[in-house]
Amino acid sequence: MEQKDDIILQVRDLSVSYGHIKALREVNLEVRKGEIVVLVGSNGAGKTSIMETILGVNTPDAGQVTFEGRDITKNPVDKNVRGGMTLVPEGRGVFATMSVLDNLLLGAHHELKTAGKKLNFVFESFPVLGVRKNQLAGTLSGGERQMLAIARALMSTPRMIMVDEPSIGLAPIVVNSIFDILVNLNKEGYSILLSEQNVYKALKCAHRGYVLETGRVIKEGRAEDLLNDPAIREAYLGA
Ligand SMILES: Nc1ncnc2c1ncn2[C@@H]1O[C@H](COP(=O)(O)OP(=O)(O)OP(=O)(O)O)[C@@H](O)[C@H]1O
Ligand SMILES: [Mg+2]
């Protein structure tokens, strides 16, 4: 099928189930190069399932995923990571009993030759991780751990980063700094697919959004239009 050049990720009619539980039903979405796209939805709506299926963790029942024009629907995770996408998982997935440095190196395990260069880049962007590189990751604050999870994702030199609920469990001021990091990465050229229950903040920094309910996309549009949508304001913004 034909695809526009400015689209980095295209998901078509994606359906996923876990046993007899249908988690996603004919989901269609896209991320254009240079965009921040947010998935909005309450618990169980399907946000994590979308990201994990794109990455290759789950095998879809039906549908297609293309990345930079290539069909990646059946690719395993490591092939997709080498191919330029990565996921910062829900709950951060940081290994508490390993050092900050070793957590970072895991992010580049498929190309350790160039890991040194990437470490320098990551420590420049996140100086606090450089200071704490020999510390166990379990001793970091929640915000620092989220930073480490994002930095580890960058170690694989992705062009698109998926970030699953980065703000969960963080104090409001720390949430702001995590969103600032994502906006800055986006300005540096990374395309971002984000999921958030902090809908207001996410829509404020995103270009577009998709609203999910029980595994379906029920609404999509420009972030500012979604922010002004009365039904969304009522359901997700408490207004
Ligand atoms: N491994 C699994 N086994 C069975 N059901 C699952 C599994 N993972 C997810 N589900 C179900 O699939 C649906 C979508 O879940 P998913 O985790 O994608 O939602 P989510 O939007 O990420 O929710 P949350 O905001 O709580 O993280 C839910 O009904 C969930 O119970
Ligand atoms: Mg989730």
Image (cartoon, grey):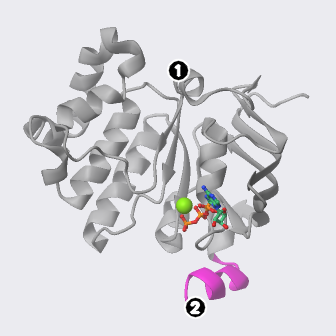
Q: Is residue 142 left or right of residue 213?
A: left
Q: Which residue is mark 1?
A: 82
Query: Is residue 60 magenta-colored?
Result: no
Q: Which mark is residue 200?
A: none
Q: Is residue 45 visible?
A: yes
Q: Assess mark 1: CB under 8 A from ligand 1?
A: no
Query: Considering only vertical position in the picture, is 195 above or below 63?
Result: below
| For marks 2 and 1 on the same chain, the one whose residue lies earlier in the sequence | 1
Q: Which residue is mark 2?
A: 239
Quarter of the N terminus within the rendering: top right
Q: Nearer the viewer, mark 2 or mark 1?
A: 1
User: x and y percent of residue 21 in the render?
Assistant: 75, 62
Of residues 85 and 3, the one nearer the viewer is 85
Q: Residue at x 39, y 63 (%)?
A: 167
Quarter of the C terminus within the rendering: bottom right
Question: Bounds of the magenta span?
Answer: 228-239
Which amino acid is tagged 2? Ala
Which amino acid is tagged 1? Arg
User: x and y percent of residue 128 in the render?
Assistant: 14, 44
Q: Is residue 15 left or right of residue 233?
A: right
- CA separation in Å, label 2 and label 1: 43 Å
Q: Residue at x 78, y 64 (%)?
A: 216
- The residue carrying pointer 2 sits among few (fewer than 14), some (14 to 19) or many (20 or more) residues within 10 Å by Cα, namely few
Residue placed furthest toward the right? 1
